Image (tube, grey):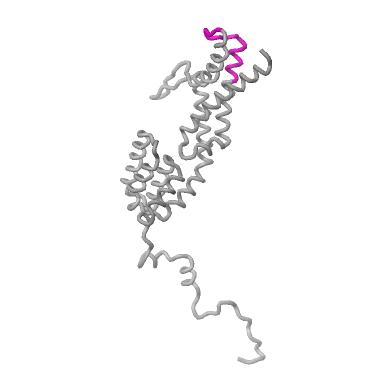
Amino acid sequence: MTWAGYLAEYAAVGLFGAGVGVGELVSRYKDDPWKALRSLPGGLYVAINAMASIGALGLILTYDWKFGATGGAVIPTRLLVAGFGAMAFFRSALFTVRVGNSDVGVGPSTFLSLILAATDRGVDRKMATERAEKVKGLMSDISYDKAQDSLQMIASALMQNLDPAEQAALGVQLEKIRQDQDITDHAKSLALGLALATVVGPEVLEATKSALGEEILREPATGAEAEAHPTAPEFLERSKPRGMPATPQTPSDPSEGP
């Protein structure tokens, strides 16, 4: 086989391995999977999957393993085994040890778990600030009592292929928010928005808010509440000293008399 043929095989198997990593990240970050893939930790995880497959193909070619295939089936078999079997190997455990009350697998899966955990932390840190700011902007004027049922119902209905297991998990999470009596209406609104944005995405959440319109918005503050929490211009106006000049005046010359 020529060098071009070897390079083509390594490129193909690298794409297979990268595809496995991409699929795993997409399944873990449903609210914005492409942003997770573009992040440095996400790219590193995809690269590790690709390198694992390339390394597996190198071993297969070095030892001339054919896995029982003959003729024209040898190359496709090698590519599939190296591309998808490498990460299956990395997810395996050679033996299990008892640590406290848990069984911990020791083997290549330990290494992959550490890499995946580091990727999760890195991607979460990068996306958390953006997610919080976006949800804060969407939910800041929404009343939780008005939106708790309709917002979830419309957002779920807009998603045609929402998995039933995800819907069930979302329902459990929203029920916990509903039963929590120790947080304010505003905090519940933010928690509701974060839970929905994680499942359906911020764009669908924004479209749902727009569709429901004013019926889920918080009533403007009036009376005693408005007096207790004035807006910035009102507060500044109230704080201005009365009966005093707005700017300091130059003292008059004593020789000029009073």
Quarter of the picture holding the N terminus: top right
35 to the left or right of 218: right
Which residue is situated farthest in the right direction here?
3
Question: Magenta includes 69?
Answer: yes
124 to the left or right of 156: right
Position above or below: 190 against 250: above
Question: Magenta includes 59?
Answer: yes
Image location (x, y in percent) of residue 69: 53, 8
178 to the left or right of 4: left
Image location (x, y in percent) of residue 167: 35, 37
Residue at image location 56% in from the left, 14% down from the top:
78
Magenta region: which residues? Answer: 54-70
Image location (x, y in percent) of residue 247: 58, 77
Which residue is situated farthest in the left direction here?
179
Which residue is situated farthest in the bottom direction here?
257
Residue at image location 67% in from the left, 91% down from the top:
255
Q: How many marks are shown on the rendered structure? A: 0
Residue at image location 53% in from the left, 16% down from the top:
81
Residue 168 in which image quadrant: top left
The residue closer to the viewer here, 117 or 44, is 44
